[in-house]
Image (cartoon, helix red, strand yellow):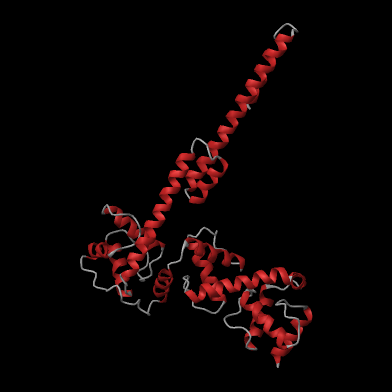
Amino acid sequence: MVRSFCFSAVIASVFSISGPSAYADEKLGDIIGTIARTVLEQQQAAQEQALWAGVVENGSAAAYRQYLDAYPQGPNARNARDHLTKLGAATTATNGAAQAEAALGLRQSDRVAIQRRLAALGFYKSGIDGAFGAGTRRAVAAWQESRTLPRTGYLNAEQLRLLLGRAATAPASTPPLADNPVTSAAQTELNLGLTRPQRVQIQRDLIALGYDSKGADGLFGAGTREAIRAWQRNTGQRATGYMSAAQVGALHSDAEVRGSEATGGRAAAIDEDLLGLTRSERAEIQQRLIGLGYLKGRADGVFGASTRNALIRWQGDNGLKESGYLTAEQVRTLRAQARR
């Protein structure tokens, strides 16, 4: 408001200049052009600063890349590139630290002892369960910082000795203990050595199947872990939140099936949508398919790739078009078969 008033006041004062000469008109145009350029430059600078402030607050690699896309030669471009380099180095360091901890072959009792020690030192305030989630990682990182060690959130053999006050006796070849499936699954995934592009593909496959991984950036945070658990539950597998080689392949196959359905079964999908099936009705249909032996797992009312494949098999066995989507008549037929 103040800027608009000042601009109007300047223009008004310029128009009050006496004399109708061409020289005055030319001078007036120069003054107006200069003022307009100044105002535009100020607005652009304000927009750049506002974006940069939001980027710094966000702090993610994606945010810094967004800034560079908008202002590749901007006043904060160098800072943005420096931050991206540091984030990349931090990711590499964290991956290396995670590999080092996995090589220890920590047992369930070791993990419980680590959590208890961190709790006794005041760094950990969650449950003592031997499962290393975000709370444990933050506690490890805080302890590392207190000892002026690299803040990775993962322990190597020397740090484990310092923390527990004893030697780390677990050999590198010791397999993870089967009594903690989450720990075992985490090490199984870590042993896959997934690259950043492979992790991005897993997230894209999850999204294609309707599981929200909170982005496809190759970083497996809480959103990705929960999406993996949801997919595992819906496909009748143990919901650990970590992937095995077989699961990576199955997930990608499921996503490809969904992709082919999107192109070849669009009309059938529309017909099914028009039925207006509720979540409970979908769960009932899944229960019928389970009873008939076409579907494994639990009936959750979500028609994912496993349910679609089950419907395709049921349709084929009944001489129907194998679309993976239901018509009203097929719903009635399926219910009648299940009552026998």
Question: Can you see residue 94?
Answer: yes
Q: Residue at x 38, y 76 (%)?
A: 180
Asked where in the image residue 332 lies, by quadrant, the reply is: bottom right
- Check the picture and name the quadrant holding the C terminus: bottom right
Place of residue 44 in the rendered image (x, y in percent of width and height, measured from the top left): 59, 33
Place of residue 294 in the rendered image (x, y in percent of width and height, measured from the top left): 63, 85
| 41 is higher (above) or lower (below) than 56 | above
How many labels sit on residues?
0
Asked where in the image residue 206 lies, by quadrant, the reply is: bottom right
Question: Can you see residue 9?
Answer: no
Which one is in front, 297 or 276?
297
Which one is in front, 100 or 302?
100
Taking the image as shown, residue 225 lies to the left or right of residue 116, namely right
Q: Residue furthest bottom?
A: 340
Q: Residue at x 60, y 31 (%)?
A: 43
Which one is in front, 166 or 34?
34
| 144 is higher (above) or lower (below) than 247 | above
- Check the picture and name the quadrant holding the N terminus: top right
Q: Residue furthest left?
A: 166
Place of residue 308 in the rendered image (x, y in percent of width and height, measured from the top left): 66, 77
Taking the image as shown, residue 101 lies to the left or right of residue 83, namely left
